[in-house]
Image: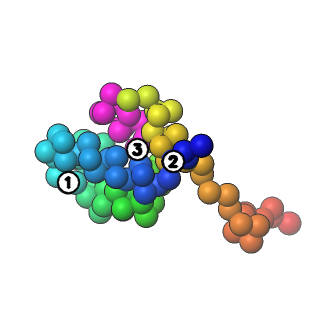
Amino acid sequence: MNTGSPEKFGAFIERIRREKRWSQNQLGKLIGAGSAYITSVENGEIRPTDYILDQLATLFGVPHEYLIAMLGPKPQLAVEDRPRPKA
């Protein structure tokens, strides 16, 4: 089974952006993000927020679920990284 990943997702975003001849800054302005954020998404360094995914889905005319599948599953927090209940 071919699973998604942030790297594959980033390459997709970069390809579509270049096809539309948009700079990272232009894409960022269209979806409410900065160019540094777009760079990090395209490089697979960060997962976009649900809000950004919604903006990209609308802008590119693809279902939100398609972008989620391309990203792959959210990484699980390690036990030591999970919030602890307050005593």
Where is 5 relative to 36, above or below?
above
22 relative to 36 in the view: left or right: left
* Numbered circle sitting on residue 25: 1
Q: Quadrant of residue 41?
A: bottom left
Q: CA distance from mark 2 to mark 1?
A: 25 Å
Give the mark nearest the N terminus, 3 or 2: 2
Q: CA distance from mark 1 to mark 3?
A: 15 Å
Which three-letter amino acid code belongs to the residue tagged 1? Asn
Quadrant of the snapshot with the N terminus? top right
12 relative to 66 in the view: left or right: left
Magenta-drawn stretch, dominant element (helix, strand or loop) = helix
Q: Nearer the viewer, residue 40 or 4?
A: 4
Which three-letter amino acid code belongs to the residue tagged 2? Gly
Which residues fall within the magenta stretch?
A: 52-61
The spot of residue 24 in percent (x, y) is 22, 54
Q: Residue furthest bottom?
A: 80
The colour style of the image is rainbow
The spot of residue 76 in percent (x, y) is 67, 58
For marks 3 and 2, give the one nearer the viewer: 2
Residue 50 appears in the rendering: no
Where is 55 relative to 74, above or below?
above
Q: Which residue is mark 2?
A: 4
Residue 30 appears in the rendering: yes
Q: CA distance from mark 3 to mark 2?
A: 17 Å
Q: Which residue is mark 3?
A: 52
Give the mark nearest the N terminus, 2 or 1: 2
